[in-house]
Amino acid sequence: MIGENERWILSFYRTSEISGSLFFGRLAKSLKPGSIQHDMTKHYADEAMHAWYWTDCLNKLGVEPLELGNAYQDQYLSAAGMPVNIMEILAITQVFERRVINQYAVHSRAAGVHALVKKTIDRIVEDEKWHIKWIRDALKGMEAEYGKNTIDGTIERFLQADREVYEKTVREHEERVRELLRT
Ligand SMILES: [Fe+2]
Ligand SMILES: [Fe+2]
């Protein structure tokens, strides 16, 4: 019911959601109690559900997910450097979540997107909007500690890394994503 390119892309999303969940899950385990721990716990649970939605969606479309290597976000760390504190972790996450929501928007507008894929994206995007919001609020709350300029500068640094990684990914997988980006 779906082509190999779309199967690959949905599998790519699935892998990325799993990596996000594991990353935030580990973080949620190590954080001290408070509002960030609270929201981070919901965040990692959401990402785990997203991985499940894609798994289920692929199965309902009659295929198994592909086993893919590194997730998209693994490349962030080599492009931008390891975040050194919780503010930097939230800043890189903010940038990543914006990329995710944009990518899902592009995909959901693509010509001929399957109704089930569109439904899955719409369901996920509702959570992703909240991810961006809680992190934005948490970063705002850190301005007194880290300084607004430092936070803005950190986001800018990660935005540059994000553009590099995204362009590199699109180049590497041009054949597969061309259908989506044509719209
Ligand atoms: Fe997600
Ligand atoms: Fe997210």
Image: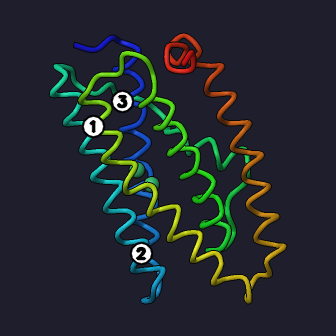
Above or below residue 36? Residue 177 is above
Please tell me whether mark 2 sits on a helix, a strand or a loop: helix
Residue 39 numbered tag: 2
Residue 6 in the figure: left or right of residue 79: left
Q: Are marks 1 and 2 in contact (CB under 8 Å)?
A: no
Q: Quadrant of the N terminus?
A: top left
Gap in angstroms between the C-alphas marked 1 and 3: 16 Å
| Horizontal arrangement in the rendering, residue 119 relative to residue 159 (left or right) | left
Residue found at x 15% / y 27%: 60
Helix, strand or loop at label 3? It is: helix
Mark nearer the N terminus (1 vs 3) = 3
Nearer to us in this view, 19 or 141: 141
- Does label 1 or label 2 sit earlier along the sequence? 2
| 1 up-or-down from 9: above or below | above
Q: What residue sits right under mark 3 in the picture?
A: 11
In primary-sequence order, the first of circles 2 and 3 is: 3
Q: Residue at the spot x=43%, y=71% of the render?
A: 40
Q: Secondary structure at mark 1?
A: helix
Q: Residue at x 39, y 21 (%)?
A: 8
Give how far across and how far down residue 87 sits, in percent: 66, 73
The C terminus sits in image quarter:
top right
Q: Is residue 41 left or right of residue 104?
A: left
177 vs 17, nearest the viewer: 177
- Whether residue 151 sits left or right of residue 117 in the image: it is right
Marks 2 and 3, how far apart in space? 27 Å
What colouring does the structure picture have? rainbow
Q: CA distance from mark 1 to mark 2?
A: 25 Å
Residue positioned 43% across, 55% down in the render: 128
Q: Position of residue 162 (x, y in %)?
A: 69, 44
Q: On the image, numbered disc 1 is attached to which residue? A: 119
Check disc 3 and give the amino acid type.
Answer: Ser
| Amino acid type assigned to the residue bearing label 2 in the image | Asp
